Image (cartoon, rainbow, N blue to C red):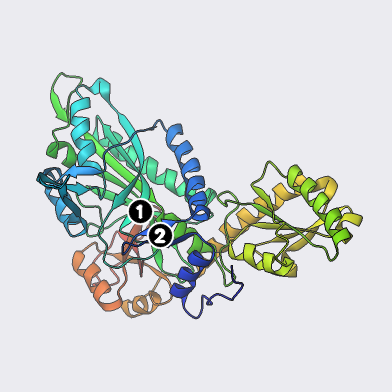
Amino acid sequence: MSNEKITKQSEDFSEWYNQVILRAELADYAPVRGCMVVRPYGWAIWENIQKTLDARFKETGHVNAAFPMLIPKSFMEKEKEHVEGFSPELAVVTIGGGEVLEEPLVVRPTSETIIGHMYAKWIQSYRDLPVLINQWANVVRWEMRTRLFLRTLEFYWQEGHTAHETSEEAEEETLRMLNVYADFAINEAAVPVITGRKSDSERFAGAVRTYSIEGMMKDTRALQSGTSHNLGQNFAKAFNIQFLDRNNELQHCWTTSWGLSTRFIGAIIMTHGDDQGLILPPRLAPLQVIIIPIYRSDDEKEKVLAEAKKVESRLSKFRCKLDNRAEMTPGFKFNDWELRGVPLRIEIGPKDIDNKSVMAARRDIPGKAGKSSIAIDNLEGEVGNLLDTIQKNLLNKATEFRTSHTYEPASYEELKEAVNKGWALSPWCGSTECEAKVKEDTKATTRCIPLEQKSHSGKCIICGTPAKESVIFARAY
């Protein structure tokens, strides 16, 4: 691997992002346009995301299942609004086994339709409810403009699909899973997301209400990082998902769906990374600690490596690795692991051994300011404390960045200026006309209507009519 400098964020954020992914070996471009190969280091981050999310899903009563990738095209046409929303993105199979298929098959862009079909078979009575199922899967959406992790033709995600007895239960589930995503983002990824409701024009095709978690990236653009949809009875009516209620009357179910994808890896990269490369939150980092032995002679080498192996053994409860590549200099290794975002580097040389200590270098604080000496006797406890401190510091830094780049403009002119340098939190009347005007004038969109609202009786910043809610306007990925 080359130790050449990567492009600075301030020079070209987009190029910085692409270089970091390729150079840190998170992913690579696939032979099919718009697809990506997720490399082992990138997949390890996704596995850690899966692990912590899956545990949260199971704690809330959900179970995993798997549904087919191929969906009869007629299924997509049963829910009119849904198919209209997805039709430009569909990949359709028309030939199988060398013969033209009687009915074309859609490669799933999402699974509401096939799961709705199955729920109609499985649900007969209120006693069968709720149904709380999640699947880990890949989906295909024929995107025209693609970017690694953020928007690719094929991507990996989880999609939850639930069926309920009442409208209230469905709304409760929708918000519960939104909060699961927010808890994960904040506490595991150190990404301080805002929870909110999408505008009608931004909601999921076929949903009654869509909620999302929105994060601010280091270029101040917003990234929709997870969504939760209350589907009402739309899909239940389209797929005849009915049950006998407690009064022995036939009713349609109330359903939800919710998903978070490998796009979240992009959120981690753009929330925390710097000009040296990745900075990974310790709780999701594939490697939490890298150990670098430092020596000048063969005699020193034998002594230092022996001690470094002992340190590695003592840190076995962490995701830890000893970099004993003889052909690489310590400086090269420092740069290599900084690029890969390993939260904590442990340096050990002859003087450290004599002092019965090691040198710890934090990835979140560059240079000497992030270095400290740790006594060998306190190794495990101090490393654990440092990783916790790094995790908290990343969240604090990202939160401070978002706060300092979120504006409450006093006029429409100020709003137009604000979205060029961050987010604009502004009163909005709720009209699609005002929403469209902002988009046309600034390329900013409504990201979400935050669930936590300041009580106000303000006027819409665009048209001046009464506004009951504030919305975040921002440019987005």
Q: Nearer the viewer, residue 402 or 3?
A: 3
Compared to 238, does 372 lie above or below? below
- Disc number for residue 149: 2
Work out whether residue 98 can be spotted. Answer: yes
Query: Which quadrant holds residue 160?
Result: top left
Q: Which amino acid does label 1 sit on?
A: Phe
Give how far across and how far down residue 466 sits, in percent: 25, 64
Give how far across and how far down residue 47 sits, in percent: 49, 46
The residue lying at 24 percent from left, 67 percent from top is 435
User: What residue is disc 1 on?
Assistant: 155
Element carrying mark 1: strand
Q: Residues within 10 Å of mark 2 (few under 14, many from 20)?
A: many
Compared to 42, does 254 lie above or below? above
Q: What residue type is labelled 2?
A: Phe
Q: Nearer the viewer, residue 461 or 219?
A: 219
Q: Residue furthest left?
A: 102
The quarter in which the N terminus is drawn is bottom right
Q: Which residue lies furthest to the right in this view?
A: 354
Q: Nearer the viewer, residue 328 or 346?
A: 328
Q: Do the residues labelled 1 and 2 touch (CB within 8 Å)?
A: yes
